[in-house]
Amino acid sequence: MAGYRPCVLLDLDGTLVDSVFFHVVAWEAALRASGHCVPMWRIHHAIGMGGQRLRPWLLGEEPENADEISADHRRRFLEHADELQPTPGALSLLDDLQRREIAFVIATSAEPETTEALLDALGRDDVAVADSGDVGSPKPAPDLLLSAIEDLGMNPGHATLVGDSPWDAEAARRVGIRCLAVRCGGFGDHRLLHAGADDVVDDPRALVGRL
């Protein structure tokens, strides 16, 4: 198609780095320390939202000590920073996009300190990153995705998001961005497809040469 220039948005947490279940454990401990007993399976269902959405989604309201809970979660998560690893094929996918000169950016809702730990685990400092500090509302709002596409100077209709959570898929669906979901975040196919994913694969390795 004349004038068609594809671009790719890559989620970081759970998509390029195997981090989801570290978040689950950290949130459960932080919430429990603050007097809130939330089952781990339910916490997992919320992973992929920004913290300001995750807390009221899990608790029914934003707690008065929200900042303290988030800080405790961040501290507990970062205690495991040395254990974080890229997901299968994550580095190969980045290399493939660069080799084929496909415009891409990592778009993450993680806070700066967490983002730094995730990028350290990925071992790549040569990639562009758009984070939630640039936008007002975290996923499933599409603000982060639109900001990242604007940074690339691209059209949402030419973009593909690679993400691991239903919240990624929902955010992409809201603004007409194709979403390819990966199972390495631990979410089932039905939930990802129902949220708006166009297809589901095991991990980034399955997308090398496909984007």
Image (cartoon, rainbow, N blue to C red):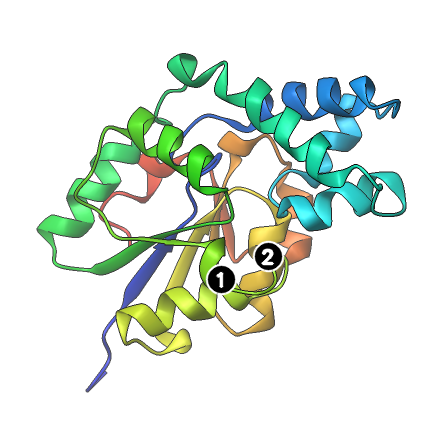
Q: Quadrant of residue 191?
A: top right
Q: Position of residue 140 (x, y in %)?
A: 63, 58
In the image, 198 versus 163, the foreground residue is 163
**In the image, is 20 to the left or to the right of 127?**
right
Report helix, strand or loop for mark 1: helix
Q: Residue at x 43, y 41 (%)?
A: 112
Question: Which residue is identified by label 1?
Answer: 144
Mark 2: which secondary structure? Answer: loop
Q: Residues within 10 Å of mark 1 (few under 14, many from 20)?
A: many
- List the residue tagged with mark 2: 138
Residue 87 is left or right of residue 124, and the answer is right
Residue type at numbered disc 1 = Leu
Query: Furthest residue to the left?
Result: 99
Where is residue 65? Give x, y as percent. 79, 37
**Closest to the observer: 118 or 90?**
118
Identity of the residue drawn at 17% across and 45% down: 96
Name the image quarter holding the N terminus.
bottom left
Q: Are marks 1 and 2 in contact (CB under 8 Å)?
A: yes
Residue 202 shows in this picture: no
Q: In screen coordinates, is 159 left or right of 170?
A: left
**How would you rate the neighbour count of disc 2 (Cα within 10 Å): few for under 14, some for 14-19, many for 20 or more?**
many
Q: Earlier in the sequence, mark 1 or mark 2?
A: 2
Q: CA distance from mark 1 to mark 2?
A: 7 Å
- Describe residue 14's horizontal placement relative to residue 21 as left or right: left
| Residue 134: % across, % down | 45, 62
